[in-house]
Image (cartoon, helix red, strand yellow):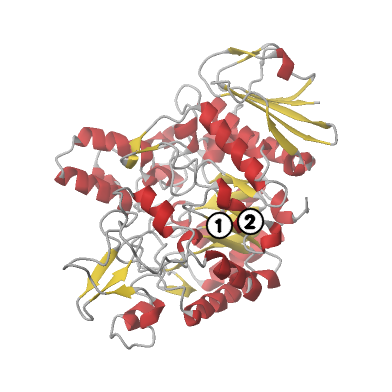
């Protein structure tokens, strides 16, 4: 296996709008991140994924970009960005940015020109079709609800948008459009950015027939009609050849519809496309027939099988990214742990999992203090367009709105977008003004200041685990073996190389469980309990043995 820095890195994701506000306008900004650079460095991470800070009308919180070359004024200036980049690099921390090129904002210059006339030079930068039977060209749905087409009265055609109506999809069939994107990427890399997280990159190649889907199910549509289009690998190879291969950077693709069987085509080192993927199979694992808000139980045996299968599929010629939450999915402690009775134990158990698996771990901001989901009582306190659309359509359909709110409390994207809880001051110490979204009321009990003073500090546990991972390359390059695949409560796996290694035991339950003797080795080097018993795992206990 080739050894390289991005395999050995530990990522930390910053959602800039919610990280730290420096000027009292209620919106997190770049200078707020600058204020907390030493906090980030103190954790021990060495790679930042910074969410979009480009100019945007914020229909989808920055994932609708109106100018790829400018910093949005609410986040600061280009000088602020360059200062942040320098400060991080001075501390040995790299920075990657979001690359959002499946779509732009409808307020981007390209689209404003494209909608002026059918013969405009920018018309072919987007996807335009005539309607069918008085309606849109086909029956595709948009990710956040409604049809994936919008009628433009000026030119009497429909434009394609897989996300909001203000996010028209770009036409990657057009070589001029691709050249513009590559030029923009070079601009940021020449500035010193260390790579890109590529938003929904698996969707950029379209199936040009635009046929109706026979099944009224969004995930079926995504997997069979939107993702992994016929020219996807041609486009990624071209991107690599024209831009990526010329820099010492890393790329991680977000890939809706990328199965483990297809993963190697994207990340095989010999393929020369991407370095790694955020595999989304786990994130959609609890989605029922009705979609993400139709929540189903995910059993531990299925959780384990997913990681086991993906590790095998990636093999030694590819690489994976290990994550349990991000800005689009619920807080990991609320989804996979116990954020009430066992907040410390389950937060540190999940940290142990992230930092002992094979693949580059990604920590979402706030996990290092055990932040959980939020349950606002009033829909007016929510900001996410997907959540608001779900609530609105459910109300129109006469649904049980108490049940709708319960589902939002479990799955809504604002669960991970409330501000970082820095202290128990007003608004969690995030801002001196009115925050763009309310802080999670738990901030009185769960915040950075309180955690750091505690003798059971989650932040300190992360520091220790990160130091342990960096102390032994076996955690990066060693093999992975699931030792108890069928156990419903214990995740036990081995990381080994050249006859030595570690056994990791994780109790994913509220019960005390007996440790199987055959999987307990002699030297216990780390537990998240100070009074660990010799033969039993306490609720949500994690252990690392060395052999």
**Residue 253's disc number:** 1
Lower position in the chain sequence, tag 2 or tag 1: 1
513 vs 223: above or below: above
**Residue 186's disc number:** none
Quarter of the C terminus within the rendering: top right
- Mark 2 or 1, which is nearer the eye? 2
Q: Label 1, secondary structure: give it.
A: strand
Report the residue marked by disc 2. 267
Identify which residue is drawn at 55% across, 72% down: 79
Identify which residue is drawn at 65% across, 39% down: 355
Front one among 393 and 27: 393
Q: Do the residues bearing badges 2 and 1 touch, measured as CB atoms within 8 Å?
A: yes
Q: Label 2, secondary structure: give it.
A: helix
Residue 112 spot, x, y in % from top left: 32, 80
* Mark 1 closeness class: few <14, some 14–19, many ≥20 residues within 10 Å: many
Q: Quadrant of residue 487?
A: top right
């Amino acid at each position: 296996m080739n050894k390289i820095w991005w395999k050995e890195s530990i990522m930390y994701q910053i959602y800039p709008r919610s990280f730290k506000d420096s000027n009292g306008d209620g919106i997190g900004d770049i200078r707020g991140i600058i204020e907390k650079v030493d906090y980030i460095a103190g954790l021990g991470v060495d790679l930042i994924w910074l969410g979009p800070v480009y100019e945007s009308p914020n229909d989808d919180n920055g994932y609708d970009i109106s100018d790829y070359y400018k910093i949005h004024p609410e986040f600061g200036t280009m000088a602020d960005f360059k200062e942040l980049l320098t400060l991080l690099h001075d501390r040995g921390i790299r920075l990657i940015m979001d690359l959002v090129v499946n779509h732009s904002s409808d307020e981007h210059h390209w689209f404003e020109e494209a909608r002026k006339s059918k013969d405009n030079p920018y018309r072919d930068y987007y996807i335009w079709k005539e309607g069918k039977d008085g309606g849109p060209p086909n029956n595709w749905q948009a990710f956040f609800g409604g049809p994936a087409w919008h009628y433009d009265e000026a030119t009497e055609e429909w434009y394609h948008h897989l996300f909001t109506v203000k996010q028209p999809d770009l036409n990657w069939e057009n070589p001029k459009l691709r050249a513009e994107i590559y030029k923009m990427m070079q601009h940021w890399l020449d500035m010193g950015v260390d790579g890109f997280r590529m938003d929904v990159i698996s969707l950029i190649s379209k199936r040009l027939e635009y046929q109706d889907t026979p099944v009224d199910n969004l995930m079926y549509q995504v997997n069979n009609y939107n993702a992994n289009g016929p020219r996807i690998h041609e486009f990624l190879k071209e991107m690599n050849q024209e831009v990526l291969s010329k820099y010492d950077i890393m790329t991680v693709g977000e890939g809706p519809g990328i199965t483990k069987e297809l993963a190697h085509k994207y990340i095989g080192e010999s393929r020369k496309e991407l370095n790694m993927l955020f595999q989304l199979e786990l994130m959609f694992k609890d989605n029922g027939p009705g979609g993400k808000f139709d929540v189903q139980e995910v059993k531990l045996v299925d959780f384990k099988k997913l990681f086991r299968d993906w590790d095998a599929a990636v093999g030694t010629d590819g690489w994976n990214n290990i994550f349990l939450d991000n800005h689009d999915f619920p807080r990991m402690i609320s989804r996979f742990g116990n954020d009430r009775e066992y907040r410390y134990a389950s937060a540190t158990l999940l940290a142990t999992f992230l930092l002992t698996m094979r693949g580059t771990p990604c920590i979402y901001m706030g996990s290092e203090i055990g932040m959980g989901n939020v349950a606002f009582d009033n829909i007016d306190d929510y900001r996410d367009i997907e959540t608001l659309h779900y609530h609105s359509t459910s109300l129109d359909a006469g649904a049980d709105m108490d049940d709708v709110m319960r589902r939002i409390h479990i799955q809504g994207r604002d669960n991970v977008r409330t501000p970082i809880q820095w202290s128990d001051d007003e608004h969690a110490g995030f801002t001196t003004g009115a925050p763009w979204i309310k802080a999670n009321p738990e901030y009185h009990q769960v915040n950075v200041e309180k955690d750091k003073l505690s003798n059971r500090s989650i932040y300190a546990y992360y520091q220790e685990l990160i130091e342990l991972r960096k102390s032994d390359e076996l955690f990066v390059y060693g093999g992975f073996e699931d030792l108890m695949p069928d156990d419903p409560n214990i995740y036990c796996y081995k990381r080994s190389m050249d006859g030595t290694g570690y056994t990791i035991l994780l109790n994913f339950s509220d019960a005390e469980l007996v440790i199987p003797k055959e999987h307990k080795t002699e030297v216990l080097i780390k537990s998240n309990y100070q009074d660990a018993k010799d033969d039993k795992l306490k609720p949500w206990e994690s252990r690392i043995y060395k052999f």
